[in-house]
Image (spheres, helix red, strand yellow):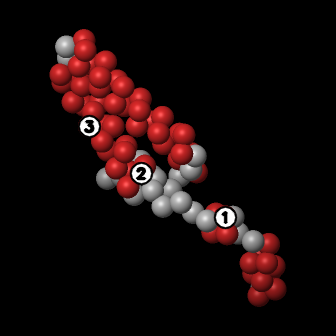
């Protein structure tokens, strides 16, 4: 089961991906400081999973594949 879709447009900016991972690890640090290891492990695990999905599995789409060109639409209309 995939919880994070790395190809979603919301994850395209680098700052958004970094912020998500940093918040997860930051919250894990808060939980460690306050003495709750269970929630620290869960938050840290979420950070590891987010880092894996948003940095390792992230494949940036080129501008050509992200938006279809108008030539393709015209070819489809001509074929009909």
Identify which residue is drawn at 18% across, 22% down: 37
**Circles 2 and 1: CB atoms closer than 8 Å:** no
Mark 1: few, some, or many residues within 10 Å (few <14, many ≥20)? few
Instruction: Write down the residue under mark 2.
Output: 55
Q: Secondary structure at mark 3?
A: helix
Q: Earlier in the sequence, mark 2 or mark 1?
A: 2
In the image, taking residue 66 as reference, residue 27 lies left or right, namely left
The quarter of the picture where residue 56 lies is bottom left
Location of residue 53 with respect to 22 vertically, above or below: below
Location of residue 3 with respect to 21 vertically, above or below: below
Q: Position of residue 49 (x, y in %)?
A: 32, 44
Mark 2: few, some, or many residues within 10 Å (few <14, many ≥20)? some
Q: CA distance from mark 2 to mark 1?
A: 19 Å
Instruction: Write down the residue under mark 3.
Output: 45
Q: CA distance from mark 3 to mark 2?
A: 15 Å
Instruction: Write down the residue under mark 1.
Output: 63
The quarter of the picture where residue 25 lies is top left
Q: Secondary structure at mark 2?
A: helix
Q: Position of residue 45 (x, y in %)?
A: 26, 37
Location of residue 62 with respect to 39 vertically, above or below: below
Q: Residue furthest bottom?
A: 79
Point out the frontmost of discs 3 and 2.
Answer: 2
Q: Earlier in the sequence, mark 3 or mark 2?
A: 3
Q: Secondary structure at mark 1?
A: helix
Mark 3: few, some, or many residues within 10 Å (few <14, many ≥20)? some
Q: Is residue 31 visible?
A: yes
């Amino acid at each position: 089961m995939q919880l994070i879709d790395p190809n979603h447009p919301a994850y395209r900016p680098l700052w958004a991906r970094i912020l998500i991972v940093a918040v997860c690890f930051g919250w894990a640090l808060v939980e460690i400081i306050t003495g709750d290891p269970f929630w620290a492990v869960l938050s840290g695990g979420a950070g590891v999973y987010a880092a894996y999905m948003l940095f390792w599995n992230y494949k940036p789409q080129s501008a050509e594949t992200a938006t279809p060109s108008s030539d393709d639409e015209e070819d489809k209309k001509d074929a009909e």
